[in-house]
Image: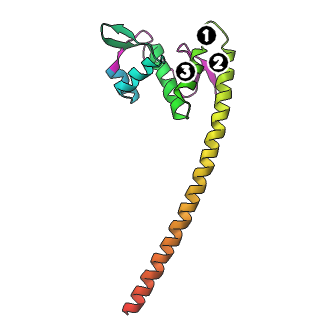
Amino acid sequence: MTVQMNTAGGVASNTNLVSNEPAGELVRIGEMAKKYGVTLRTLRFYEDKGLLKPERDGATRLYTHRDRVRLKLILLGRKVGFSLREVKQMMDLYDPTGTNTKQLRLALEKSEKQLVRLQKQRALIDDAINELSGAMNAVRQMVAERAASTSAAAN
């Protein structure tokens, strides 16, 4: 995985976190919600939590390139199981003029812990799938046996 720092307050990876839109372009809340598949309420919630800081034109929220990249980071963090608090902690350590070593170390530490949690969840899910598959095979066998005995009795 290639990692680079971006101007949005977070670690970017090869998961295409950088927007293709011009950096100076402002996006209204409705466009932002539609583009990223979130609700208006979600965007307002992220703003209330200090994760996004859209510009204002009266009551209209206008999202910058920085906000768009931060939203991608938030959504990526949520997708892999980080809490919003953890995502905010990592993004808040970003320093556009520094090396961001502290941010990178924290992101790596949290990612390692999350990976262990996800691997444990996967093992539990694999066990559940195996149990369910076994039970389904037993039920199929019973259905087949009963169908065979019913058709033998009819003849």
- Where is residue 119 shown, x and y percent of the image? 64, 43
Check disc 2: other Cα within 10 Å, few if <14, some if 14-19, many if 20+.
many
Q: Which marked residue is nearer to the observer: mark 2 or mark 3? A: 3
Left or right side of 26 for 140: right
Tell me where the magenta segment starts and ends, as one range: 1-29
User: Of the residues under marks 3 and 1, which one precedes in the sequence?
Assistant: 3
Check disc 1: other Cα within 10 Å, few if <14, some if 14-19, many if 20+.
some
Confirm or deny contact between disc 1 and disc 2 (CB under 8 A): yes
Residue position for label 3: 88
Left or right side of 31 for 15: right
User: Of the residues under marks 2 and 3, which one precedes in the sequence?
Assistant: 3
What residue is at 64 percent from the left and 24 percent from the top? 107
The amino acid beneath tag 1 is: Asp
Residue 95: assigned label: 1
- Where is residue 144 shown, x and y percent of the image? 46, 78
The amino acid beneath tag 2 is: Gln
The amino acid beneath tag 3 is: Lys
Check disc 3: other Cα within 10 Å, few if <14, some if 14-19, many if 20+.
many
Q: How is the image coloured?
A: rainbow
Which is more toward the observer, 86 or 56?
A: 86
